[in-house]
Image (cartoon, rainbow, N blue to C red):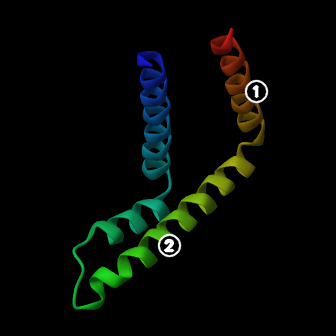
Amino acid sequence: MRRVINDGLISLAAVVVLLVMLVSIDPRVRDMLRNMVAPPTGASGIAGVGTKLGDVSMVMLKAAHDHSVENAPLVIFSVAATILVLFMLRT
């Protein structure tokens, strides 16, 4: 059970590192996150949090797609490396 928790935490840390790298590289994502973290104004501030979260996720997906298209060979290598690491951890 302890190993499962450690593996989950490592996976979560890897996702967080990737998101931080994406935010540091792409100004669109950085601006959307800055707007999302800004304090809400008026009564519609709380209702708009879901909309802001959806907008941020769409911008992050578009930025990830754009960067993956620009760096297709590196993306292919990363996916292959991830699959190999998963098979190594399984055995």
Q: Residue at x 50, y 31 (%)?
A: 11
Q: Earlier in the sequence, mark 1 or mark 2?
A: 2
Position of residue 83 in the picture relative to residue 17 (left or right):
right
Kindly report the distance in space between the C-alpha atoms of the residues bearing marks 1 and 2. Answer: 30 Å
* Location of residue 50 with respect to 18 vertically, above or below: below
| Quarter placement of the N terminus | top left
How busy is the neighbourhood of tag 2: few (under 14 within 10 Å), some, or many (20 plus)?
some
Q: Nearer the viewer, residue 11 or 16?
A: 11
Give coordinates of residue 30: x percent, y percent. 41, 60
Spot the residue most to the bottom: 43
Q: Residue at x 70, y 23 (%)?
A: 81
Image quadrant in which you'd find residue 48: bottom left
Give coordinates of residue 41: x percent, y percent. 22, 85
Position of residue 78 in the picture relative to residue 57 (left or right):
right
Q: Secondary structure at mark 2?
A: helix
Query: Badge 1 is on which residue?
Result: 80
* Location of residue 58 with respect to 49 vertically, above or below: above
Q: Nearer the viewer, residue 88 or 65?
A: 88
Position of residue 74 in the picture relative to residue 26 (left or right):
right
The type of residue carrying mark 1 is: Ala
Q: Residue at x 68, y 55 (%)?
A: 65
Residue 21, label in figure:
none
Q: Residue at x 65, y 50 (%)?
A: 67
Q: Nearer the viewer, residue 64 or 11?
A: 11
* Location of residue 28 with respect to 15 vertically, above or below: below
Q: Nearer the viewer, residue 58 or 29?
A: 58
Q: Secondary structure at mark 1?
A: helix
Give coordinates of residue 61: x percent, y percent. 60, 59
Count of residue discs? 2
Query: Badge 2 is on which residue?
Result: 55
